[in-house]
Image (tube, rainbow, N blue to C red):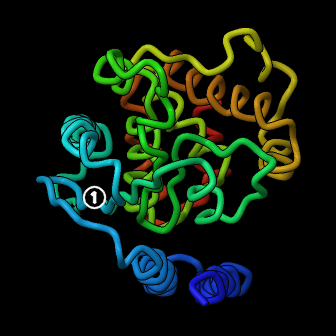
Amino acid sequence: MKKIKLLLAFLALALIIWSGVEKGVFYKTGRKIIRYNMLNSVSEYSKKSFYHSDIYYGKGSEDYIGLIGTNTDYFFSVYKKEFNMEDMEKVSIILYPDEYALSDAIGIDYSKKPPLGVYYAGIISLMSPETVFKGKEAYIKDDFLKNGPIAHEIAHYFLDTKTGGNYEAWFSEGVALYYEYKYTGFEWRKDLKGAAENIDITKINREFKEMDQALAYRCAFEIVLDITYRHGDSALGEIFDGLEKGESLKSILKAYL
């Protein structure tokens, strides 16, 4: 029953997007519907609140709640400046005990390796650090800040909230990877350096989800990185402001690429 309700919520948002009215009040309404259903699906979880987050978690994950809350508070303070957003609502974080629970929640086949974290509709879904760093518990605190998904997923949350959904998927990934690189030092797939040299915006807009994902993410990262090299970090803030006003990403980027 929970899966059916969540599926219906996803379909409702898909219909809104298909109708071409994903921005503004319609987009926000669809996001609220999905958020409600996702949180309802973990109604048996415990909840702990921090300054910038509400964390929902099951048994066995209690030891990591403080770590996640602290990391979230840190990146909130950083991104408030990057996105020029002082008044941000808390983000809801669902901490799943293992890859099976996370796969089930985000609707992917168990045979596929799920990501460490997923952002969607105002909610960040995470796999428990206990599963991610199994056998390396002594290093969890240090590794989680650099190699964990918090920096990446909260960047998605800020961009989505700032623009009301007015962005392309590749740009959201590129922005998240860029800030992850800037603040943690993690660089996505350095072995694919130069991947964006032969990719134009039209292609990545149209084929991003069909491309090899490692390559697609690297291309997105390099495009955003190139914008900051050419125009400085302030250029991203200008792009975010344009998207917030309802301008299309395609038209905005003409001045930066």
Q: Which residue occupies 26% across, 66% down?
A: 46
- Split into 4 quadrants, where in the image is the C terminus? top right
Q: Position of residue 52 (x, y in %)?
A: 18, 53
The type of residue carrying mark 1 is: Ile
Q: Which residue occupies 47% across, 78% down?
A: 41
Does residue 100 lie above or below 188 as drawn?
Answer: below
Q: Is residue 195 left or right of residue 122?
A: right
Q: Is residue 218 left or right of residue 123?
A: right
Q: Which residue occupies 73% across, 28% down?
A: 219
Q: Secondary structure at mark 1?
A: strand
Residue 59 seen = yes
Q: Is residue 135 left or right of residue 110?
A: left
Q: Position of residue 129 (x, y in %)?
A: 41, 36
Residue 20 seen = no
Q: Which residue occupies 37% across, 26% down?
A: 144
In this orientation, which residue lies closer to the viewer: 119 or 46?
A: 46
- Residue 216 position by quadrant: top right
- Residue 122 position by quadrant: bottom left
In this orientation, which residue lies closer to the viewer: 67 or 220?
A: 67
User: Circle 1 sits on which residue?
Assistant: 55
- Split into 4 quadrants, where in the image is the N terminus? bottom right
Does residue 166 lie above or below 207 as drawn?
Answer: below
